[in-house]
Amino acid sequence: MRVCVISEARSIHTRRWMGSLAREGCDIQLVSSSKAEIPGVTLHRHPIYSPNPWHQVRNVRSIRELMRALKPDVVHLFGLFSVSSLGTMWAIGGLQNLVISVWGSDVAPAGPRESYKERLIKRHLLNQGECLVAVSEYLAHEVERYLKGPRWIEVIPWGVDIDVFKPVERKGNSGAVTVGFAKRLHPLSGPDMLLKAFRYARGRCKRELLLKIAGSGPMEGQLKQEAAQLGLAGSVEWTGWLGTPEELRDFYCSVDMLVMPSRRESFGVSAVEASATGLPVIASRFGGIPEIVLHGETGLLVDADDVAGFGEAILLLAGNSDLRLEMGFRGRKRVEEKFDWRDSVRKMVRIYNKIQNI
């Protein structure tokens, strides 16, 4: 089965999905303005968007010519970040067997902050899809805001490789308890709020508390300054960006809980990865996170930006090693049942097969 995918090859999500689909036997023809080596995938490097209307017309014509030459069985618009334009509306017009994946912030939250043009483009694009694929039930509901009527929507979570992200033996001890954070250092991830919640917990905890932050981003310098101002410099370790699954797994296995105080989150891959390693997760009660973290079972949910709430949740887990182990065990079982990466890829292949045979 030949699948022509329009997406950006530089995205880790694109590389991961397309490589896995190729290993499942799909002939993946990736149209991208960026370059990357993806085993088993044929890359057609091609400009997708240009602010110059004449260049965009030329791009669209060229993409449609490429489509006619490739003769794909399925066309997959994988994410709307780089393709939400008037030109793309023309480019996909009339294409058969079109699958459209939405990732999160490319469509959510739908609301008054969108311009009329943005909403018009997204509405047109999404109503062209034979099947719309969302990463969570939350995002599927957000997609429905753009639709003119009932459409075929599938929820396929971005699972994890449970053979890589797997538990280690965790034992309660009388030493320090380490809190982990693994997200981009961006306001939407809430790392500034985490520092305040950590200080709240540290000042009330009978055990020594440490914080390990994995990630990089525009807030890094500001956060290090804030940590010093809050008197936390000696209690916070900055590991930087972790680029491989193995590095992330080792990070999760080095901490006692993961805290994910996101201000916006359509899914929450970090929560799935951490749960897969047997780690309890404290996270915001927002977006798709409650579909991953079950409050009181696999972790604790707190309202976003509730400093005291996150601080109390950290205190609760820090003082109860048995609860941490129990929540981690349940989290691993849930990942095995709901978020196995192999199941996610097979679901996508089944969608391709079903569309091809309609």
Image: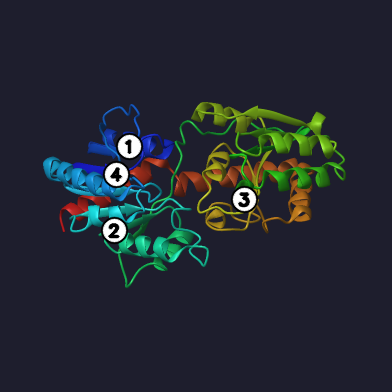
Cα distance in 3D space between marks 1 and 3: 30 Å
Q: CA distance from mark 3 to mark 4?
A: 29 Å
State the SS at label 3: loop
Q: CA distance from mark 1 to mark 4?
A: 9 Å
Can you identify the residue that label 3 sits on?
262
Specify which label sits upstream in the sequence, 1 or 2.
1
The residue where tag 4 is placed is 6
Q: Secondary structure at mark 1?
A: loop
Q: Could you tell me which quadrant the C terminus lies in?
A: bottom left
Mark closest to the chain's N terminus, 4 or 2 = 4
Q: Quadrant of residue 50?
A: top left
| Left or right of 58 in this view: 260 | right
Graded by Cα atoms within 10 Å as few (under 14), some (14 to 19) or many (20 or more), the crowding at tag 1 reads some
Asked if residue 156 lies left or right of residue 192, the reply is left
Q: Position of residue 185 (x, y in %)?
A: 62, 39
Asked if the residue at tag 4 contacts the one at tag 3, i.e. Cβ–Cβ closer than 8 Å, the answer is: no
Q: Residues within 10 Å of mark 2 (few under 14, many from 20)?
A: many
Q: Residue at x 24, y 49 (%)?
A: 57
Residue 131 disc label? 2
Disc 2 to disc 3, C-alpha distance: 29 Å
- Name the residue located 55 percent from the left edge and 26 percent from the top edge: 247
Amino acid, disc 1: Ser
- The numbered mark, 3 or 4, whose residue comes first in the sequence reads 4
- In the drawing, does residue 2 fall left or right of residue 247? left
Q: CA distance from mark 4 to mark 2?
A: 15 Å
Is the residue under label 3 in contact with that under label 1 (CB below 8 Å)? no
Q: CA distance from mark 1 to mark 2?
A: 24 Å
Give whichever of discs 1 and 4 has the lower sequence position. 4
Q: Residues within 10 Å of mark 4 (few under 14, many from 20)?
A: many
Question: In the rendered view of the protein, which quadrant contains the N terminus?
Answer: top left
Please give the residue where the numbered disc 1 appears in the rendered image: 33
